[in-house]
Amino acid sequence: MVAQLESWLGEADFPIAFTGAGVSTLLGLRDFRGKNGLYQDFDAQKIFDIDVFDRDPSFYYRHTRDFIYGLEAKRPGLVHQVLARWESQGLLKSVITQNVDYLHQRAGSRQVVEVHGSPATHLCRSCGAAASFEAIRDRLETGETVPRCPCGGVFKPQITFFGEALPQAAWAEAERLVRKADLILVLGTSLTVYPAAGLPELCVRTGGRMVLVNDQPTPLDHLAWKTFDDLESTFS
């Protein structure tokens, strides 16, 4: 299937990719709504709920130690590597991702738009002071449960939580790309978290073709030019 996808990409004038948590599950990381997703254990939406964070930031830090702050132990997976190779070969213009795990960048992708923000910087909820991802990670590794600013406030990653606005610059760039794209590969996402899930639909509505690969049906299957239900076999 990779050869077929490469053929379609080569025929397109402006192909892009749109990725979700499913592209990282091949590394052993759990997604949210998949067969073994975090929602099987608890209401994982609370991890990224701003009201929950402000009441009890330890909930966020407790549940993200592995899939955000422990990611240096993980190597980018097959899908990340293939997308990075396609970009380097000129077959792919950009990756728009809902993920906050750095794995596209670590695989070598350079044109990555993070529509749900990034943990690269953490800001104090009280005074606005900044701390790097590495600084927060190191503090968590020493046993801190909630990293705090010298002023006493709590550091929060610049990930967009439920109840917060999406990063305007990233969102504007994502919209520009999907309006320009004539082919969008939608990979490993249930397409249920809006407004980001509306980007592939916007691409189709403005004349682009959508190839959709996910291990479960999505609300946009009927709009897809091609659908595949096995990410691993598609890219292996």
Image (cartoon, helix red, strand yellow):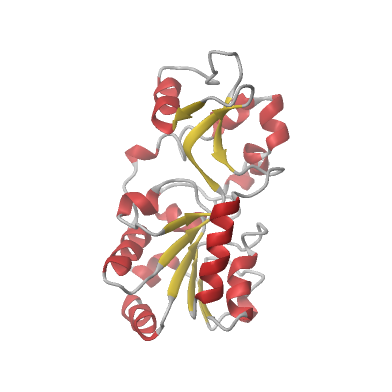
Residue 41 place in picture, x, y as percent: 62, 41
Asked whether residue 161 is in view, the answer is: yes
Say whether residue 51 is left or right of residue 94.
right
Depth check: give the residue in front, 219 or 201.
201
Say whether residue 48 is left or right of residue 10.
right
Residue 200 place in picture, x, y as percent: 58, 70
Image quadrant in which you'd find residue 62: top right
| Residue 121 drawn above or below residue 208 | above
Depth check: give the residue in front, 92 or 63.
92
Residue 185 place in picture, x, y as percent: 47, 72
Q: Seen from this angle, which residue lies furthest bottom?
A: 11
Q: How many marks?
A: 0
| Residue 192 drawn above or below residue 218 | above
The N terminus, quarter of image:
bottom left
The C terminus, quarter of image:
bottom left
| Residue 108 drawn above or below residue 88 | above
* Residue at x-position 33% and y-position 38%: 73
Asked whether residue 35 is in view, the answer is: no
* Residue at x-position 31% and y-position 79%: 3
Say whether residue 188 is left or right of residue 90.
right
Residue 144 place in picture, x, y as percent: 49, 17
Depth check: give the residue in front, 13 or 54.
13
